[in-house]
Amino acid sequence: MSARTEIVTSPATASHAGGPHIPPGTASRIAEALGADLRIADLYDDVGGPVYHLMARHDLSEISEVVTALRDTKGPVLELACGSGRLTLPLLVAGHQVTGVDTSASLLEALSAQVGRLPARRAADRLTVLRQDMLTLDLDTRFEAALLGLTTIGLVPPERRPGFLRGVYRHLLPGGRFLLTVHTPDIPPGEEEINTFVIDDAVVTLIGYMEPDLTGRHVAALSVARGAAPLLVTSFVHLVTPEQLTSELVAAGFEIEPTGTVRDHLGRPTEGNTLIIARRPS
């Protein structure tokens, strides 16, 4: 059984508008060295989406905190920028009714394909996926909780964050909560952080480049897989501090709840990750 899917054409690509770009630093030198042999795509479009899905499958950060925080939530949950289901699938296994929103057709297809293999009974019946722009979302349904996963708030341009946060507020029932995780990278201005992973049959090199003015971080992933041309996928993440985001949430009408540390699957605190829980007043 497959998840219910609604395809809505949207001219924007939600939180990842603008298409692929070549970040400065190592990513730029890779592009220059490989030239026409290199494919370049946005991390979240239909070409780059499979690379994102590959990396997300092995990222277990914040899952435990999110499932625990929503343990007593009985009503529907809205997951914004749900991607291929890194958080969606654990929520379905926990018994929640989830509406997942994303603009990437390939990622939503990957999500729907995985739901049928879940051990949870009738999980597919509890999932609705919408291909829509989360920045212009306007649904009739009101939710008991909304969720925005790790780093995703950084894909929202700063000038659009106030309107986006008010939009989330409107989609919540009175007393409903909004969970979002903020990542504060520890990369000096104008410098890079580079990590290489072997995932399945691919070697993925993840490159983070910090803008000198600290306004944002370029993200690039070079994927070299057996039998495929090298692929460079890129994105840009606007930086926002937990304090700044908390202030903007309050301005949008939310009340802020105490939160704890985000931990990895071994229970270790993850560097620079802060889970914020905001509540629409009853």
Image (spheres, grey):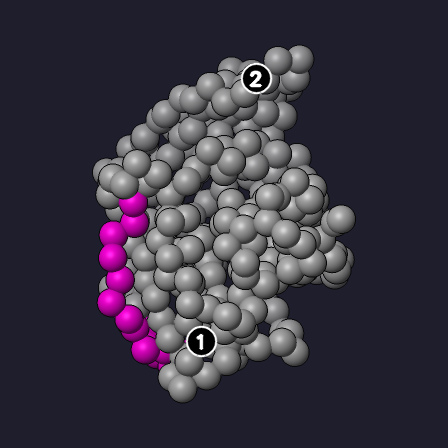
Identify the residue position indicated by label 1 in the image. 176
Sequence order check: which comes first, mark 2 or mark 1? 1
Q: Is residue 195 left or right of residue 111?
A: left
Placement of 146 over or under 150, stated as above or below: below
Q: Is residue 242 above or below residue 278?
A: above
Left or right: residue 133 compared with residue 93: right
Q: List x then y, in percent, for residue 274.
A: 29, 54
Q: Amino acid at mark 2?
A: Asp
Q: Is residue 77 above or below residue 200?
A: below
Q: Amino acid at mark 1?
A: Gly
Q: Can residue 149 be found in the magenta stretch?
A: no
Where residue 212 sits: x, y (%)? 29, 42
Find numbered disc 1 in the image and state the secondary structure of the residue it sits on. strand
Q: Residue at x 51, y 36 (%)?
A: 57
Residue 163 image position (x, y, % from top left): 48, 73
Residue 217 falls in image quadrant = top left
Q: Residue furthest top?
A: 227
Residue assigned mark 2: 201
Name the residue rendered at 50%, 70% in the picture.
Answer: 74
Q: Residue at x 35, y 26 (%)?
A: 194
Labels 2 and 1 touching (C-beta < 8 A): no
Q: Residues within 10 Å of mark 2 (few under 14, many from 20)?
A: few
Q: Quadrant of the C terminus?
A: bottom left
The quarter of the picture where residue 186 lies is top left
Q: Which residues are magenta?
A: 248-263
